[in-house]
Amino acid sequence: MPQYLTLTFTVALLCLALSACSQPDNDGQGRSGSTNQLYRLTGTVAIGRPGAWAEVCIETDCSRANQEGVYRLLSERQRSALMQATIENADQSVTELTGLYRHEPDQTVALVNINPTTDVLLDSWSQYQLSQTLDVCTTNAGCRNDLISSFTPDRQQAAQQQLQTWLAPDWQTARNPFSDPYIADPGLDWLDDLHDHVQLEATPTGLNALDNEDDILDTLSYATLFDENAALIAIGGDALTAAFEIPPAVPASDNPITIDYQAIPSSPFTAPVDWQVDVSGTRSNFQGALSFQHTLVGPTGRVTIGSGALFAASLTDPGPYTWVVVATDTEGNQATDGLALQASASDVIGQPSFGAEGSCSTSPLTANASNICISTVDGGSLGACEASDSGSTQTQYSPAPCSPVSQQGGVFLGTCTSVLNQIRIYHYDNSLRNTGETLTEQRTRLRNQCVSEGRTWSAELPE
């Protein structure tokens, strides 16, 4: 790693099995002939645990998350929109959560998380501003549009700041739950841990914080929540400490369906390959034949849909795939399971492809940090980046690819690529740093450093 980088990253093979981008289409053929701009949306679905195999939709385009709650979705976008995730629980109940995609025409990559905080903030604003619960508002196009347009980034930022004060010290740092990297693991992400122990509930009169026994810890008025200048009193460490001592309730499985599948070949494998999965061993406690719906999400954004006990597909591209099956019995019971697949490239060095997954970004950005993002070779052996610390700089794993436009307020400067090391480093201007250099001078300096290390520099937008 060059000396001018102030961060390190950890290689983790376990992170290879992420779900792919998807471009939903009812006939399973995708929309590769479309001339409209496609936007790559990705993020994490979580409820204090991963939203495994969740269905994620933005308007009519849908995808599936992998077992870690990471989804990818390729969609034609012309406007901001709500994103909705449906998570099937072990007891056959369903959890529905909402997030928000903010459309920026030139930003074709977006990280959009869906979790209890994104859902409750949208619900709170809907009740406060529009006098409608989020559930009711989402059923009406006019209300949805009013919600999206009125819930400005400033109002969102104010609410996040107030939550940090109200829930301190367990809301540990400034955090954007909508678009900052999120890991659905309470041992690795404090926000996921908070979701496990403090439940936020939007009511007609204010925002309640409850423990896992449904006792109200405190109530925050909406006028205070959405005004960063309004004074408030923190819930307090004693109350939060007691809340964290109550374990979260995990739904017990009472599903009569047991899914059994055999995949050939099993992951990992080298693309291209003919892949098939047999679910004929699946059984229900009720008599009668079962029906099966298959969804395969590929790394290029194509969704293939099939039915029946045997599902087959030709996997031509290296990278991550997600297969999900929904089994339904004669009584209408449903069970969902899936598999994350990883197809390696037959020649990743000869024909490198970067950026479908495994990006790291510097967060939080400081005046002393390099504003960079690291991307690994798709289908290669290095895998994805994990959170790590190096001095004052912290890197965070993100399922989103590096942005070719901007990052953390800094414009794109160029990329430094090492095919041998299978990494590409995206450089951006650090708006917090005042060095007196122009953007051209920064590019020249970074290019010279890159080339001196035997790497390849480009100031053109990556393909």
Image: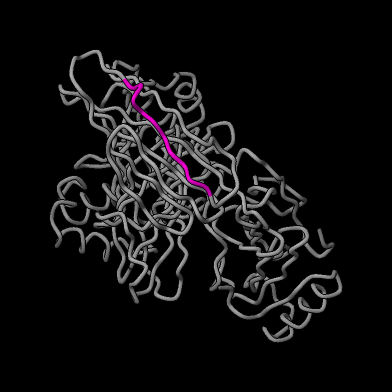
The quadrant holding residue 327 is top left
Magenta segment's dominant SS is strand
Judged left or right of residue 394, residue 113 is left
The part of the image, by quadrant, that contains residue 41 is bottom left
Pinpoint residue 204: horizontal percent, then vertical percent.
19, 42
**Point 54% across, 57% down: residue:** 356
Q: Is residue 281 magenta?
A: yes
Q: Examine the rendering and report whether any part of residue 229 can be seen.
A: no
Q: Which residues are magenta?
A: 273-282
Residue 332 position in % (x across, y down): 17, 26
Q: Residue at x 39, y 21 (%)?
A: 250
Q: Pick the quarter of the image with the C terminus.
A: bottom right
In what quadrant of the picture does the N terminus appear? bottom right
Q: How is the image coloured?
A: one colour
Q: How many marks?
A: 0
* Residue in the foreground of this view, choosing between 73 and 271: 271
Relative to 241, say whether 41 is above or below.
Answer: below
Is residue 445 rendered magenta in the image?
no
Give the residue displayed 70% in from the left and 76% down from the top. Answer: 434
Q: Residue furthest front?
A: 274
* Residue 153 image-quadrant placement: bottom left
Of residues 214 and 416, the one nearer the viewer is 416
Question: Is 165 situated above or below 60?
Answer: above
